[in-house]
């Protein structure tokens, strides 16, 4: 059987002071998760630990500064894969050298379906 996407949720997160890309990414994932309910999966009796595949894509300006393992650990269910790509937005504060970091997250849930 092939994996097919059944849920796509999007979120944004930020770190307004300190330029912490991981913090912004975690907030983006939580924003996406708070827009979603897995009632369909419960109705189908899907085991979220073994039968739900979650792909998280994080977009930030400096992908190498995101701790993907922390992002992965923040997901409550599923077999999780995290990809970090260039995206998001940095808002400069040249007077204080304190950029605001904005991250985007796409959280996909896939199931093995015929």
Image (spheres, rainbow, N blue to C red):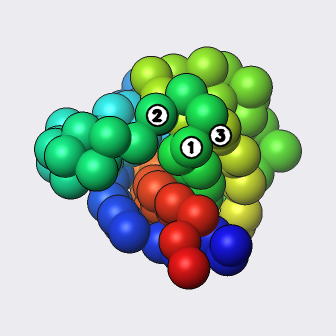
Q: Secondary structure at mark 1?
A: loop
First along the sequence among labels 3 and 2:
2
Do the residues bearing badges 1 and 3 touch, measured as CB atoms within 8 Å?
no
Q: Which residue is mark 3?
A: 80
Q: Position of residue 67 (x, y in %)?
A: 74, 29
Do the residues bearing badges 3 and 2 touch, measured as CB atoms within 8 Å?
no
Residue 29, compared with residue 98, is above or below; it is below
Horizontal arrangement in the rendering, residue 82 relative to residue 30 (left or right): right
Horizontal arrangement in the rendering, residue 32 relative to residue 77 (left or right): left
Q: Position of residue 54 (x, y in %)?
A: 56, 49
Q: Secondary structure at mark 2?
A: loop
Q: Residues within 10 Å of mark 2 (few under 14, many from 20)?
A: some
Horizontal arrangement in the rendering, residue 111 relative to residue 28 (left or right): right
Residue 17, compared with residue 105, is above or below; it is above
Q: Which residue is mark 1?
A: 51
Mark on residue 62? Answer: none
Which one is in front, 18 or 57? 57
Q: Position of residue 61 (x, y in %)?
A: 65, 59
Could you tell me if residue 19 is visible in this image?
no
Which one is in front, 1 or 93? 1
Q: Residue at x 65, y 40 (%)?
A: 80
In three-dimensional space, the C-alpha distance between marks 3 and 2, rounded to whole angstroms, equals: 11 Å
First along the sequence among labels 1 and 3:
1
Do the residues bearing badges 1 and 2 touch, measured as CB atoms within 8 Å?
yes
Q: Secondary structure at mark 3?
A: strand
Q: Which residue is mark 2?
A: 48
In three-dimensional space, the C-alpha distance between marks 1 and 3, rounded to whole angstroms, equals: 11 Å
């Amino acid at each position: 059987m092939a994996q097919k996407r059944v849920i796509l949720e999007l979120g944004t997160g930020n770190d307004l002071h300190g330029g912490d890309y991981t913090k912004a990414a975690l907030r983006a994932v939580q924003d996406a998760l708070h827009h979603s309910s897995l009632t369909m999966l419960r109705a189908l009796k899907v085991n979220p630990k073994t039968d739900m595949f979650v792909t998280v894509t994080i977009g930030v300006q400096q992908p190498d500064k995101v701790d993907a393992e922390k992002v992965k650990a923040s997901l409550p269910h599923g077999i999780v894969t995290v990809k970090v790509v260039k995206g998001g937005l940095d808002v400069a504060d040249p007077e204080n050298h304190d950029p605001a970091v904005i991250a985007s997250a796409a959280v996909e849930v896939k199931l093995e379906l015929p």
